[in-house]
Amino acid sequence: MALKTFVKIVSLFLMLVMFLTSPLGLLIGKKEARIAPEKENCIVSFAAISDMHLRGNFKPIFQGMLELGLRDMENAKEKLDAVAFVGDITDHGDFDQWDVFADAVSRYDIAKNKLVVVGNHDTWGPNRDEFDNPQDGVKPTFIRYNKLIANRDITEMYYSAIINSCYFIALGSEEDHVSAYLSDAQLQWFAAEMEKAAATGLPIFVFLHQPINGTHGLPYNWELKKDDPPDEGGIGDQSEQVVDILRQYDNVFYVSGHIHSGFKNADSKIGVKYGSVETIENNNGNPITLINLPSYMYFDFIRGSHLVNGCGWVVEVYDGEVLVRARNFATGTWLTRFDQTVTLVK
């Protein structure tokens, strides 16, 4: 616990430093650094960030850091088709923290579509013990702010969207644990949505705040303990149920956050071996691509190999391939050494 507290204090200090000096990043970034498709004939392009942990106190710093990224997204040469906020948007799910997020997003025209995904911190809001309290429980709060922020009418913690014919499936925990809990109804819905998505012949993007158990350096990456149980830091008990559904299909991309581990390539010499982009096999022997998002607001100088905040991914879909491009949205620069190209299964 002391180590986690120390990491958070150092991260907060360095976040302040970066916020105050971020305009300098524009001077040292890659030439032609505005967000734009790498190639012609892009089918869909979206940005994804996670773990903003917005708070009412320190609001100028937290909202200011977020707005640096939102401004970068708004300034894209071609408007993004979507921006996904993949959980832990707030630090405790309180109304004032959701209001910070809503206020920031309302100031910028960032994309044609917005996807708001729930994280474990977002489930720790008012009446967390009465999750479905119709007045101000966690679920009604999440539904209300989805409408306010994304103009999306939803009735559950999970939903799907079709963007340029591609399916975007947002899963969400229905309890307030650190790990995820997906009801039988949600799992059945998920299986049905995956079947519909596969019929399009296009890549399928699945979002859940928690990674699949044992991926991206887990369980060690969670508490930095060698004897952590295998489900620590991941979906938890239902990880295999989620994976069993994913494994039935080709060209699946699973996008998560949660572990605050920065950008990292599998061959990095820093810390435990893992990659921010990894694969597992599906039932056909083809890859399921796992994309883990760095913490936008905090970085971890122990786990991560790219030690700044304000980062996330830009994903571009083309005929035959998907580009996964690392970006520092706060400074408006590409971090090309972490980029990945995924060849699609025909």
Image: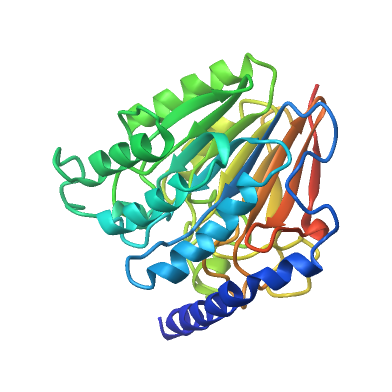
Whether residue 261 sits left or right of residue 77 in the image: it is left
Q: Where is residue 105? Give x, y as percent.
A: 46, 48
Relative height, residue 157 to residue 13 (above, below): above
Relative height, residue 157 to residue 221 (above, below): above
Q: Where is residue 25? Give x, y as percent.
A: 72, 69
Relative height, residue 114 to residue 332 (above, below): above
Can residue 180 be seen? yes
Q: How many numbered dots are placed on residues in this image? A: 0
Quarter location, residue 43: top right
Residue drawn at (60%, 67%), measured in percent from left and top?
309
Q: Where is residue 22? Give x, y as percent.
A: 64, 71
Quarter location, residue 116: top left
Q: Nearer the viewer, residue 78 or 177?
A: 78
Quarter location, residue 150: top left
Residue drawn at (52%, 57%), measured in percent from left and top?
67
Can residue 287 be seen? no
